[in-house]
Image: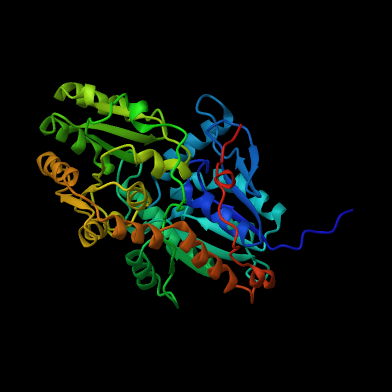
């Protein structure tokens, strides 16, 4: 028998498939680079079997937590539980969120079998699974809670109802005490979390910034994917698509921008809202200038977006979470070297104005959006200032903050004190996560 692996074992958990979650991948790789053994647990697509792969020394496992839709016992039981859940108030989250039982069925035994030194919980959804896996505080591993959003006031959109938001907020309120340390993505969210939960210290901000690469490279070309030739003004939106993301505003704005094309880099692809956006574009007579293109691996996004002339972020800030956010896409636009036309979300618009990165428009106002796109197209970015921003908001700097959070927990798990950011540069192959 070989020697037992003496490295501290960190298990990260998240309620998605991980391949498109840049923060999970970068966090897992950073902690592995620092000297930990890392396993990341996510969720397989509905009805898909368990699968796993290893990238950059991190073992990624997708658990079959969600049943296939249709007439099968697991899905029927879940569908009935969802109906019964409406009988209970949102605050009774163990009953009003039946999906928790699906996740617990897979995550609880997986966590116990892995016997981690640290559980890093990405987003609120699996905090209760950690509590179920390790109910005794005396034997519970170190818990790091990574609040990707401000849960108490998430945007209401599609399946995410006000009732669901209230339920998740109640879960966070009841389970945030599990965490030995809390990190989040923006200063405003950190301050609100401390105030809301009477935390002894303000959560550490680890910005959702992309890796800075010495050379710009993407495996595909955005203009080629969109079928837009050189010299044609091209705007780009990148990220999740939902009514709250405001893409209909930009499609409507195309009517006032007769020369401009719009590329939507949607996640997932093809996106369920694609037909709705295409129908709107057809109705407005701009369908030939709307291009829905597939995403590239997360580490290639800035280089891919760089093929456009302007970036557009039309999010509607009808929630405190959006208003306080400094999202991944903002820093990806900076690294892509693109001027930005953003809706007037408080923190994102302030960032764009403060650094002279583009123009701001009124949320949901197509005419204002068109004007901002025109203004942003005329912006000549200060390249020296842009490079300073890239260096300040690159994952390499955030890696140091994350590792320091882990090191601060050495009194609970002594092996964490030996973690250190290595001098070796990041490699793209260490974060190119794909499942067979």
Residue 285 occupies which quadrant of the picture?
top left
Identify the residue shown where x is 26% and y is 54%: 319
Camera-side residue: 156 or 257? 257
Question: 114 or 97, which lies in front?
Answer: 114
Does residue 56 appear anywhere in the picture? Answer: yes
As rendered, which of 102 and 186 lies closer to the eye? Answer: 186
Q: Report x, y in % for residue 158.
A: 32, 39
Q: Say which quarter of the image contains residue 413.
A: bottom right
Left or right of 139: which side holds 47? left
Name above or below for residue 214 compared with residue 192.
above
Residue 38 position, x and y percent, is: 64, 54
Q: Position of residue 403 (x, y in %)?
A: 55, 66
Q: Position of residue 15 (x, y in %)?
A: 51, 46
**Quadrant of the image occupied by residue 385:** bottom left
| Residue 49 falls left or right of residue 66 | right
Residue 131 visible, this angle = no
Above or below, 238 relative to 394: above
Q: Quadrant of the C terminus?
A: top right
Q: Is 100 positioned to the left or the right of 384 in the image?
A: right
Looking at this view, name the residue that lies furthest to the right.
1
């Amino acid at each position: 028998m070989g020697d037992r692996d003496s490295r501290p074992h960190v298990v990260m958990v998240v309620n998605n498939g991980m391949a498109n979650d840049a923060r999970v991948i970068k966090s897992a790789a950073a902690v592995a680079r620092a000297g930990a053994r890392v396993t990341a647990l996510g969720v397989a697509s509905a009805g898909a079997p368990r699968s796993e792969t290893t990238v950059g020394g991190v073992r990624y496992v997708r658990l079959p937590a969600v049943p296939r839709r249709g007439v099968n016992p697991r899905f029927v039981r879940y569908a009935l539980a969802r109906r019964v859940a409406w009988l209970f108030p949102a605050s009774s989250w163990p009953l009003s969120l039946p999906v928790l039982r699906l996740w617990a069925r897979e995550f609880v035994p997986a966590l116990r079998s892995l016997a981690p030194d640290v559980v890093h919980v990405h987003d609120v959804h699996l905090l209760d699974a950690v509590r179920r896996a390790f109910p005794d505080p005396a034997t519970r591993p170190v818990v790091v809670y990574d609040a990707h959003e401000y849960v108490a006031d998430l945007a209401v959109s599609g399946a995410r109802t006000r009732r669901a938001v209230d339920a998740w907020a109640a879960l966070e309120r009841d389970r945030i005490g599990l965490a030995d340390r809390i990190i989040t993505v923006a200063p405003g969210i950190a301050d609100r979390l401390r105030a809301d939960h009477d935390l002894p210290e303000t959560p550490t901000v680890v910005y959702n910034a992309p890796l800075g690469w010495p050379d710009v490279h993407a495996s595909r070309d955005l203009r080629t994917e969109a079928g837009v030739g050189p010299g044609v003004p091209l705007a780009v939106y990148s990220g999740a698509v939902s009514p709250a993301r405001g893409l209909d505003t930009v499609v409507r704005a195309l009517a006032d921008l007769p020369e401009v094309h719009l590329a939507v880099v949607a996640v997932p692809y093809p996106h369920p809202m694609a037909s709705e956006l295409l129908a709107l574009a057809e109705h407005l007579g701009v369908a030939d200038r709307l291009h829905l293109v597939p995403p590239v691996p997360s580490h290639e996004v800035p280089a891919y977006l760089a093929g456009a002339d302007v970036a557009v972020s039309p999010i509607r800030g009808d929630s405190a979470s959006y208003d306080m956010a400094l999202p991944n896409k903002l820093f990806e636009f900076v690294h892509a070297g693109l001027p930005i036309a953003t809706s007037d979300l408080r923190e994102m618009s302030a960032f764009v104005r403060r650094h002279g990165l583009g123009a701001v428009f009124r949320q949901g106002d197509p005419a204002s959006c068109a004007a901002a796109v025109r203004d942003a197209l005329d912006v000549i970015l200060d390249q020296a200032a842009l490079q300073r921003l890239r260096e300040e908001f690159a994952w390499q700097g955030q890696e140091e903050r994350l590792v320091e959070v882990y090191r601060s927990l050495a009194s609970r798990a002594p092996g964490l004190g030996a973690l250190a950011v290595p001098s070796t540069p990041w490699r793209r192959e260490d974060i190119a996560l794909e499942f067979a």
